[in-house]
């Protein structure tokens, strides 16, 4: 056994606990082992290995696998102190995604199509991959780590790894086959093996450096609205409705491209209802405040009937997964919900799953700012009225754009759309209760509103002008 496999694991529990991309914080780690290590540079001042870690937990849950690009130097540069893992042999091991020499190696390896052991660096046919460009770490992600190379390329290292083809790579390849202009074009990938099966380790794409994140744009729009106490949302300079409409059309176009590339199918309402109900039951057991809503939510799920059209979708779509470039909107990060099993993230689902995710995101963009405002009771009531107006306007604009791009209005399938919105809101209640209890009122009030709509108008009735009024 190499010194890396013998000595590195002792440092890893503490190191992992400090990383934003390690989602198992708070769960007692029983052991960390090096499940596999591929030497990329095995001589010289820099030693570089791509390591797969096997993490087991004291609660008896299934082991999970994570990925580290491990560099070792005798004296790492001061800027690598943050990434230090610990001493291995006569060198210091660190996370080499912060090392310019190591990330330059990755770019060169993809461009040249190298193979190191079980690890293959695979350029996309015809892709123009730059050379001689220094990489810089981007510190905005929760579940992965990305490095930008100038203004042309960005490499994403998947931190949590599972056997099988990662949906992010799979769907980007499918969209590239369609000549999609709604995503950053794929340039290459890093592929390896885990438990004897193929696994996706990383991917290289076009980098849209002159872009703005949809979430940040929406927050700016809300702040502009709140700053103008006597103007309606459509009168404020930062009105977002036009962008929301264009974004809806972009999502519809991506759905069409995915359907052409990967086909379509159907899913029985009975199967979907069972899955949604199981998640609701589990969530209610964890969050008692959901209890008063359970019967109403189940009634919405019970309204699902027949066969529901399905295809490959984004799976975790919200404003933070969108970029506005000078040419239009792009969708990013097709990995799906990282905590879900790969088989679940790779299955076909209704496009309304993505629509519902965006509608929930509009609610979050506006109502969380109300909760963050330093306002008295009267001012808060006014802010909520203005927030209601912004949410209605932008949710409606998004659906208008989607209807134009898809040729069908998602609001005409109100029963399914409402069920997916509720499923997302139930997930949000669990997350917020654990992480930000003061925000739990956002999804809880949305749940009450959605259930009330279903009771008043019938879960199978289209409702183009539904009012997402929230008063927390």
Image (cartoon, grey):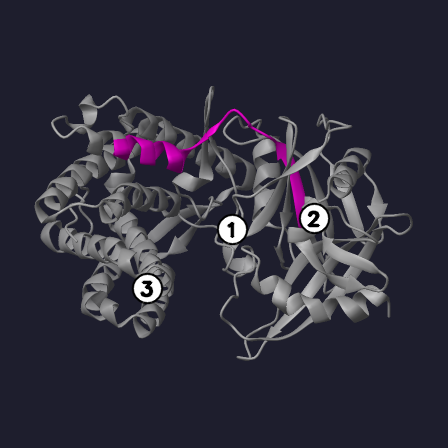
Q: Dot 3: within a 10 Å radius of its alpha carbon, few (fewer than 14), some, or many (20 or more) residues?
A: some
Whether the residues at callouts 2 and 1 have beta carbons within 8 Å, the answer is no
Closer to us: 218 or 375:
375
Quick check: is 218 in the magenta stretch?
yes
Q: Dot 2: within a 10 Å radius of its alpha carbon, few (fewer than 14), some, or many (20 or more) residues?
A: some
Res 207 → quadrant? top right
Cα separation between marks 3 and 1? 19 Å
Determine whether the residue tagged by mark 3 lies in a helix, strand or loop. Answer: helix
Counting from the top left corner in percent of width and height, residue 435 is at 38, 61
Q: Dot 1: within a 10 Å radius of its alpha carbon, few (fewer than 14), some, or many (20 or more) residues?
A: few
Determine whether the residue tagged by mark 1 lies in a helix, strand or loop. Answer: loop
- In the rendered image of this protein, does residue 447 appear above or below residue 215? below
Counting from the top left corner in percent of width and height, residue 228 is at 18, 28
Question: Which residue does the image show at 49% across and 45% down from the upper left?
Answer: 312
Q: Which residues are magenta?
A: 200-223
Q: Earlier in the sequence, mark 3 or mark 1?
A: 1
Q: Nearer the viewer, mark 2 or mark 3?
A: 2
- In the rendered image of this protein, does residue 460 appear above or below residue 273? above
User: Does residue 219 appear left or right of residue 332 in this picture?
Assistant: left
Res 63 → quadrant? bottom right
User: Does residue 180 appear left or right of residue 424 in this picture?
Assistant: right
Whether the residues at callouts 2 and 3 have beta carbons within 8 Å, the answer is no
Quick check: is 30 in the magenta stretch?
no
Counting from the top left corner in percent of width and height, residue 354 is at 39, 44
Cα separation between marks 2 and 1? 20 Å
Residue beneath disc 3? 433
Residue beneath disc 1? 142
Question: Which residue does the image show at 34% across and 68% down from the upper left?
Answer: 283
Closer to us: 152 or 339:
152
- In the rendered image of this protein, does residue 110 appear above or below residue 460? above
Asked if residue 306 shows in the view, the reply is no
């Amino acid at each position: 056994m190499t010194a890396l496999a013998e000595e590195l694991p002792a440092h890893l529990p503490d190191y992992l606990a400090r990383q934003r991309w390690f989602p198992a914080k708070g769960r007692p780690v029983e052991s960390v082992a090096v499940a596999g290590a591929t030497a990329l540079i095995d001589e010289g001042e820099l030693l570089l290995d791509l390591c797969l870690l096997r993490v087991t937990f004291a609660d008896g849950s299934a082991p999970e696998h994570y990925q580290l690009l491990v560099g070792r130097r005798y004296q790492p540069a001061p800027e690598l102190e943050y990434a230090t893992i610990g001493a291995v042999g006569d060198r210091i091991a660190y996370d080499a995604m912060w090392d310019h020499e190591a990330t330059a190696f990755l770019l060169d390896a993809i461009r040249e199509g190298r193979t190191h052991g079980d690890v293959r660096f695979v350029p996309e046919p015809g892709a123009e991959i730059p050379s001689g460009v220094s990489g810089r770490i981007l510190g905005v992600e929760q579940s992965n780590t990305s490095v930008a190379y100038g203004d042309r390329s960005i490499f994403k290292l998947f931190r949590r790894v599972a056997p099988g083809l990662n949906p992010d790579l799979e769907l980007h390849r499918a969209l590239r086959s369609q000549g999609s202009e709604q995503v950053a074009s794929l340039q290459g990938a890093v592929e390896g093996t885990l438990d004897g099966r193929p696994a996706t380790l990383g991917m290289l794409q076009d980098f849209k450096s002159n872009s703005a994140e949809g979430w940040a744009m929406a927050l700016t729009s809300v702040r502009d609205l709140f700053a103008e106490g006597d103007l309606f949302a459509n009168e404020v300079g930062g009105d977002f409705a036009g962008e929301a409409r264009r974004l809806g059309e972009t999502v519809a176009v991506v759905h069409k491209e995915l359907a052409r590339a990967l086909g379509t199918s159907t899913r029985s309402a009975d199967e979907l209802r069972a899955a949604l109900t199981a998640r609701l039951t589990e969530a209610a057991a964890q969050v008692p405040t959901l209890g008063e809503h359970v019967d109403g939510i189940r009634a919405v799920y019970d309204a699902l009937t027949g066969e529901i059209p399905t295809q490959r979708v984004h799976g975790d779509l919200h404003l933070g997964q969108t970029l506005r470039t000078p040419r239009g909107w792009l969708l990013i990060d097709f990995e799906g919900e990282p905590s879900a099993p790969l088989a679940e993230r790779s299955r076909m689902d209704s496009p309304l799953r993505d629509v519902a995710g965006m509608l929930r995101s509009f609610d979050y963009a506006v109502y969380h700012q109300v909760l963050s405002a330093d306002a008295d009771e009267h001012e808060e009531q006014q802010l909520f009225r203005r927030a209601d107006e912004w949410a209605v306007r932008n949710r409606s604009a998004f659906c208008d754009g989607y209807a134009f791009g898809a040729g069908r209005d998602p609001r005409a399938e109100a029963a399914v759309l409402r069920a997916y919105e509720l499923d997302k809101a139930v997930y949000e209640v669990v997350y917020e209760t654990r992480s930000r209890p003061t925000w739990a009122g956002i999804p809880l009030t949305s749940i009450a509103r959605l259930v009330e709509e279903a009771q008043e108008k019938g879960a199978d009735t289209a409702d183009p002008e539904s009012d997402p009024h929230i008063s927390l």
